[in-house]
Image (cartoon, helix red, strand yellow):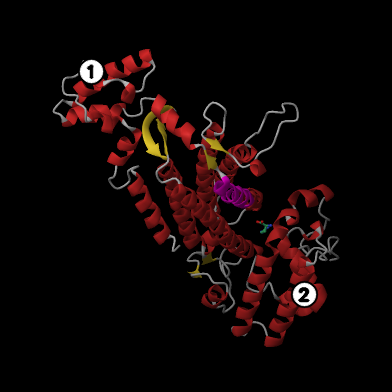
């Protein structure tokens, strides 16, 4: 039988050419060509294993490796002719290989399917992306530590409900960001461990009848082991979902940092100056300096969470084993990795140039009755029950509000009207410095504790 659709590698079964629109509709090469390097890397390992197992000759293997290396160079130089007629990255490369080396090129696909091939490529791609992301995350962690070091004793208000709550140190606040990133880092490493398992050999779904050595291919590609079930290996994309979940959490953290930077740089807070290089002006209002980078990062967090939901919905209800649905995993995944790397990079570049306005931070803590809890604790130490102390301090704060004075500015005689237990020593507790210094337990905001936390963090990061 003559085949109408003869340019296609998998066409012999078809009597009719693919509908022109369907060809475009089903092709993925426009986006999956970005896994070309991983595809070639996987193919070289596969061919090496096939030769070792006497399924290919050494000469065939050498031709394949030479041809693939040439293709890699062509792609790098932008000289490779990608064609949607060959549907995806895998078939484009295989077709070109056959053009270049003839019959040996046609043997590369022995004992393999695009199903285990694509599952391998994505894992190799993600493994590499996680490394790039980890490097940017590390840069950001170092930037935060350096800034915290400069401000271990800079006093600012700490907030609950976005209302001034208690005084804290700016270094302590920054170290809270740092801790979030520590967990983010752990999640990425954990995800990498689970995805670093090799699908090749699963073939289309059931494995292959050739005497292959999956341990060898796994070793050649740096995977920790071959996957344990062929059906599972070609179908599940849970590793991509897990990565996107880890990425969404990082983006969620960055969006929280962003929200704070945006608030703090507003005229109303005026706690920090963001570097000019990370802000833009307004086309109409000459006075404006907009915090574009934090705002964009905050916005992009929504996009990454959207990708997480896309991937979850993509996988949900798919029967075993491979389904074409899975081709839809790539765009959200690639965009997740790109977005995350860019946001982390922008943050790592920006954080060292954040300039805190210490005086404004200090005055804001002072205006907000941030040491009210300290006064209550003082009364408890003098023998009052905490609830009674809470009540008394509430009255003192009310007086402060009415007369526009901080607790530390109310004279002793007036304070003593609220409780006879109050004496001269109260003022050391009512100062912002006294309040933060008292919280010197592990995890507390005292300057000395923050310094210790920074030191421990540097040690853990091997800095
Ligand atoms: N482009 C496909 C994907 O991304 C490759 C696997 C195709 N396999 C198949 N049986 N059609 O999933």
Pointers 2 and 1 in contact (C-beta within 8 Å): no
Relative placement, left or right, of 110 versus 130 is right
Residue 223 appears in the picture as rendered: yes
Q: Quadrant of residue 92?
A: bottom right
Relative placement, left or right, of 105 versus 454 is right
Q: Mark 2 points at which residue?
A: 70
**At which x and y percent is residue 72?**
74, 70
For mark 2, give the secondary structure: helix
For mark 1, give the secondary structure: helix
Image position of 341 with respect to 90: above or below: above
Q: How far apart are marks 2 and 1 (CA)?
A: 88 Å
Between 227 and 321, the residue placed more toward the observer is 227
**At which x and y percent is residue 79?**
83, 66
- Which one is earlier in the sequence, the residue at label 2 or at label 1? 2
Which quarter is ligand 1 in? bottom right
State the extent of the magenta-drawn residues as a range.
Answer: 337-353
Q: In which quarter of the image is the N terminus?
A: bottom right
Q: Mark 1 points at which residue?
A: 413
Nearest-to-viewer mark from 2 and 1: 1
Furthest-left residue in this view = 383
Q: Which residue sits at x=61%, y=42%? A: 275
Residue 238 appears in the picture as rendered: no
Q: Which residue sits at x=63%, y=70%? A: 42
Dominant SS in magenta: helix
**At which x and y percent is residue 314?**
59, 46
């Amino acid at each position: 039988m003559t085949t109408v659709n003869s340019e296609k590698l998998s066409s012999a079964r078809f009597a009719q050419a693919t509908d022109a629109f369907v060809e475009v509709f089903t092709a993925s090469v426009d986006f999956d060509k970005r896994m070309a390097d991983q595809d070639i890397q996987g193919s070289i390992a596969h061919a090496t294993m096939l030769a070792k197992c006497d399924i290919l000759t050494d000469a065939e293997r050498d031709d394949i490796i030479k041809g693939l290396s040439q293709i890699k160079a062509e792609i790098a130089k932008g000289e490779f002719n990608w064609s949607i007629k060959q549907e995806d990255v895998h078939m484009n490369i295989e077709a070109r290989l056959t053009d270049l080396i003839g019959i040996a090129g046609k043997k590369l696909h022995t004992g393999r399917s695009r199903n285990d091939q694509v599952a391998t490529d994505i894992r190799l791609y993600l493994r590499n992306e996680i490394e790039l992301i980890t490097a940017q995350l590390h840069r950001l962690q170092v930037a935060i530590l350096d800034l915290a070091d400069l401000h271990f004793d800079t006093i600012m208000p700490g907030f609950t409900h976005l209302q001034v709550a208690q005084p804290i140190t700016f270094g302590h606040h920054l170290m809270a960001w740092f801790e979030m990133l520590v967990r983010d880092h752990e999640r990425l490493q954990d995800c990498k461990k689970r995805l670093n398992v090799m699908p090749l050999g699963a073939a289309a779904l059931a494995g292959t009848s050739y005497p292959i050595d999956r341990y060898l291919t796994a070793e050649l590609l740096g995977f920790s082991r071959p996957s344990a079930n062929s059906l599972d290996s070609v179908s599940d994309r849970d590793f991509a979902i897990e990565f996107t979940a880890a990425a969404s959490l990082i983006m969620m953290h960055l969006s929280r940092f962003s929200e704070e930077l945006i608030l703090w740089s507003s005229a109303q807070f005026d706690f920090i100056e963001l570097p000019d290089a990370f802000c833009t002006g307004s086309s109409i209002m000459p006075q404006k300096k907009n915090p574009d980078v934090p705002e964009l990062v905050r916005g992009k967090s929504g996009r990454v969470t959207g990708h997480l939901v896309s991937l979850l919905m993509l996988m949900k209800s798919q029967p075993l084993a491979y389904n074409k649905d899975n081709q839809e995993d790539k765009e959200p995944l690639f965009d997740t990795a790109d977005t995350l790397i860019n946001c982390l990079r922008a943050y790592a570049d920006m954080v060292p140039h954040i300039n805190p306005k210490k005086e404004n931070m200090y005055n804001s803590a002072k205006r907000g009755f941030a040491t009210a809890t300290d006064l209550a604790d003082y009364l408890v130490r003098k023998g009052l029950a905490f609830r009674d102390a809470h009540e008394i301090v509430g009255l003192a704060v009310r007086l402060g509000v009415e007369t526009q004075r901080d607790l530390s500015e109310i004279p002793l005689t007036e304070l003593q009207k609220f409780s006879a237990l109050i004496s001269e020593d109260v003022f050391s507790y009512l100062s912002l410095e006294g309040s933060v210094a008292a919280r010197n337990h592990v995890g507390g905001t005292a300057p000395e504790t923050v310094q210790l936390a920074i030191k421990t963090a540097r040690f853990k990061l091997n800095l």
